[in-house]
Amino acid sequence: MPPIKLVRSKRKTLCIEVTTNCEVIVRAPLRVSEKEINRFIGEKADWIEKSLSKMKLRQNKKAEENSNLKPLNELDIKLFTTKAKRIIPVKVKKYADIIGVDYGRITIKMQKSRWGSCSSKGNLNFNCLLMNAPDEIIDYVVVHELCHRKEMNHSPRFWAHVEKVLPDYKERRKWLKDHGNELYFF
């Protein structure tokens, strides 16, 4: 079993999470003793092992699926950037009108860790690799960033704005989490 990460917060209950990276996280209330946390981990040991096995199988399956893919080269990235500069501003205009917000400059570039961002001045950045994603995922990222023009956070109010425009945003968001790494390959 890998090392267990303990995260304490103002929560009321103990819980265990096994991440897609096979990391085990125990979330605990501030006042719960280590003895009680260790007892809880012991009770859940079988579940943790089972969950870790499932995640490892998933990782192996993804690795097999991706073995046929080749990493993007500079030319691919230039082509995606050119295509994104044509497609994304049209989507931004469309959804900005629907949401009722304005925006500043739109920048398209290759980013390693973000699909999009919105500055406090309303400037929008988008990852050119979105051109390797299905159209509804591009729409989700555009709507997500434009909703930051109303709420510069990820509060329930922010997600309510996203849901008004894309009632199925949770499925789109999950797709991006599950398949985002694949967008770096061709």
Image: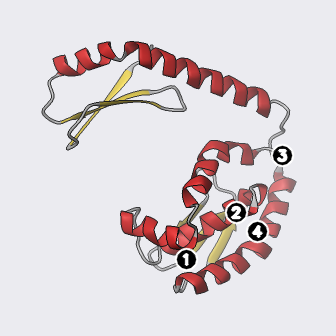
Query: In the image, is residue 142 above or below residue 177?
Result: below
State the image quarter where residue 93 is shown: bottom right
Image point (51%, 79%), residue name: 122
Residue under numbered circle 4: 84
Residue under numbered circle 2: 136
Q: Earlier in the sequence, mark 2 or mark 3?
A: 2
Q: CA distance from mark 2 to mark 1?
A: 22 Å
Please say if the residues under marks 2 and 1 sit with CB atoms less than 8 Å apart.
Answer: no
**In the image as oriented, which residue stretches furthest toward the front?**
167
Q: Mark 2: which secondary structure?
A: helix
The amino acid pointed to by label 2 is Glu
Q: Mark 3: which secondary structure?
A: loop
From this viewpoint, is residue 147 visible?
A: yes
Q: Earlier in the sequence, mark 2 or mark 1?
A: 1
Q: CA distance from mark 2 to mark 3?
A: 19 Å
On the image, the x and y values in percent for residue 36 come to 18, 20
Q: CA distance from mark 2 to mark 4?
A: 14 Å
Residue 123 has which mark?
1
The amino acid pointed to by label 3 is Phe
The local crowd at label 3, few if under 14, some if 14 to 19, many if 20 or more residues have their Cα within 10 Å, is few
Q: Mark 1: which secondary structure?
A: loop
Q: Earlier in the sequence, mark 4 or mark 1?
A: 4
